[in-house]
Image (spheres, helix red, strand yellow):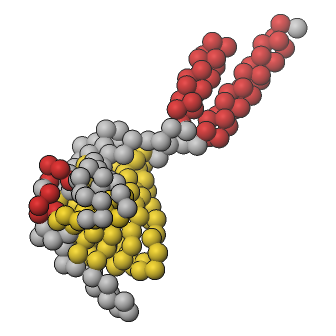
Amino acid sequence: MRKSILSAAVALLAIGATAGAQAQNVVANGDFEQSNVATGGFESFANLGWSNVQWGSYNGTSSIVDVAGDQSARVNGGDAIWATFQVGTAGDYEISFDTFGDGYYSLYNASTSTALNIDFLSNVTETTVTSSIYTLNTTDVYRLYFGSTVLPPTFSNSLTVDNVTVAAVVPEPETYAMMLAGLGALGLMNRRRMNGKRA
């Protein structure tokens, strides 16, 4: 019994040591930096192509825009961009991204042809960070869409998107500390019970 508790504690410590590390992003080029756009310039998705950007565009009018060396995607009115991904481990995943302008995002399960969500975005005065958690599985292919809409009162006709991540939700180190404390309490109770039997 003592060895099994010790083994469990060691395993939890090993997992907890990596818990602080950031989970891997399953979306390719979520920061849109792989497109090699000139500083201060822009290039359309139609010219850059899927193999470079690793994001699709329906009519190709959206662009990768560089502002002082930081690239982002600008989705123009009437267009939508999308990335396809799969997850290696089933579980909860957090989708996070920065946006500016008016538009929408949607997570779509391409394997079952169902939309898991569609949310409208409207933040025209400053960049907003949005995040949501979804339970994903390994057998399905997912698509993450961003589209531009024209909404009053600003009638913005573009949506800027950057820092898109889809990553497994990693438990906080405090969760592992509580589990270790519980195992320690179990070990102490077992030890007292064994000492009581010997007396």
Front residue of this view, candidates 169 and 29 = 29
Front residue of this view, candidates 198 and 32 = 32
Say which residue appears at 19% left-offset and 78% top-offset.
78
Left or right? Give the position of 146 relative to 98: left
Front residue of this view, candidates 139 and 30 = 30
Residue 3: which quarter of the image? top right
Residue 25 in the image: x percent, y percent?
36, 46
Residue 47 in the image: x percent, y percent?
11, 61
Q: Quadrant of the C terminus?
A: top right
Residue 149: which quarter of the image? bottom left
Outermost residue, right direction? 199
| Numbered disc total | 0
Residue 16: which quarter of the image? top right
Left or right? Give the position of 90 relative to 35: right
Residue 152 in the image: x percent, y percent?
35, 91
Outermost residue, top direction? 198
In the displayed structure, would residue 62 be above or below residue 179?
Answer: below
Residue 137 in the image: x percent, y percent?
31, 45
Q: Is residue 122 visible?
A: yes
Say which residue appears at 24% left-offset and 43% top-offset.
139
Outermost residue, bottom direction? 153
Say which residue appears at 25% left-offset and 58% top-offset.
38
Q: Quadrant of the N terminus?
A: top right
Say which residue appears at 60% left-offset and 20% top-offset.
10
Q: Is residue 135 visible?
A: no
In the displayed structure, would residue 135 be above or below residue 139?
Answer: below
